[in-house]
Image: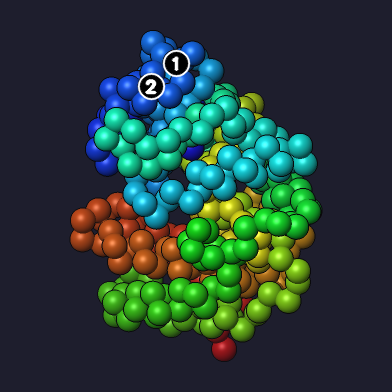
Amino acid sequence: MTSRQDKAPGPDGRAGIDAELVARLVAAQFPQWAGLPVRPVAVDGWDNRTYRLGADMTVRLPTAAGYVPAVEKENTWLPRLAPHLPVPVPPVLGLGEPGEGYPYPWSVRGWLDGGTATTPERVGGPAELAAFARDVARFVRALRSVDPAGGPAAGAHSFLRGTPPAAYDAETRAALTALDGLGVVDTAAAADVWDAALAAPYEGPPVWFHGDIAGGNLLVRDGRLAAVLDFGTSGVGDPACDLVIAWTLFSGESRAAFRAEVAADPAMWARARGWALWKALISVVGFLERDPSLAAEHARVAGEVVADLAPRT
């Protein structure tokens, strides 16, 4: 994540990364920016720690080895994608190397203004949310239209986004088994959703996808999409994974507006439901005991996904 309108800094020190380490890395490798204030952004991602550098930049550092491929991928492809997209994406300003005890490559990005669209209320009322949904859909369509030649094929670097949902069949089935009988999720109806996703293979050409179209990666100003962040799970493959926001952020009028504008055929919509269901189910299982409120939110998403499928017969 590269920008946040929120003013208060977030917590420091997660994954062994703190502001002092970032300041040392910058001073050693980018002396032209040495001495600029460094502070954690208010709303941080999980895959990376993000720090604001001065007024106009951010520093983004992977928290584990599995997230390292995203650094070079973003540095290579963001400048190539940016001219074809309807809103700004993070400007690439520098690529850092391991140092000062930090073992991974890291990056410097330009700051983008806007507030995160983490809840519908942060966008606005129903009319504003529907307009925002159309903005997001237009972004997804524009990304899909970029020439995919040479782009990174979906795989481990994208955490299997862009591949068939079947990649997570075992996890989904295990979650359904774990939740069966608890009354948290209608597991029989959820199994129908999952089966429908598996039965709707992608038959089109590989296209660009973002991989994490979520409220925390979307910046909003005056109720409209202002920028899109975090292309760490992007790649070339099946774009169905980019429609998950239909159930995590949108509902009713805004979901209908998104679906109409994104131009997804029934098979793509079915696979998108599968992606949304997989993530919701494993999150319910993961949070059920240690954070019941988060588990309830993911159970809500699962319920929205299940309700989107025609009633069982």
**Quarter of image, res 48:** top left
**Rendered position, 310 above or below 89:** below
Q: Residues within 10 Å of mark 1 (few under 14, many from 20)?
A: few
The residue labelled by disc 1 is 31
Q: Could you tell me residue 37's position as x and y percent?
A: 38, 14
Q: Could you tell me residue 276's position as x and y percent?
A: 51, 64
* Amino acid on which disc 2 is placed: Ala
Residue sitting at x 41%, y 14%: 34
Q: Residues within 10 Å of mark 2 (few under 14, many from 20)?
A: some
**Rendered position, 196 above or below 19:** below
Of residues 302 and 96, the one drawn nearer to the viewer in this rendering: 96
Q: Residue furthest top?
A: 35
Which image quarter is the C terminus in? bottom right
Q: Visible in this render: residue 173?
A: yes
The answer to whether the residues at label 2 and label 1 have Cβ atoms under 8 Å apart is yes
Q: Is residue 209 left or right of residue 147?
A: left
Of residues 231 and 129, the one drawn nearer to the viewer in this rendering: 231
Q: Is residue 139 left or right of residue 248?
A: right
Q: How many marks?
A: 2
Residue at disc 2, secondary structure: helix
Q: Could you tell me residue 64's position as x and y percent?
A: 34, 49
Residue 68 is tagged as: none
Of residues 297 and 141, the one drawn nearer to the viewer in this rendering: 141
* Amino acid on which disc 1 is placed: Pro
- Alpha carbon separation for disc pair 2 and 1: 6 Å
Q: Residue furthest left?
A: 289
Residue sitting at x 58%, y 70%: 163
The residue labelled by disc 2 is 28
Q: Visible in this render: residue 2?
A: no
Residue sitting at x 59%, y 32%: 92
Residue at disc 1, secondary structure: helix
**Rendered position, 37 above or below 16:** above
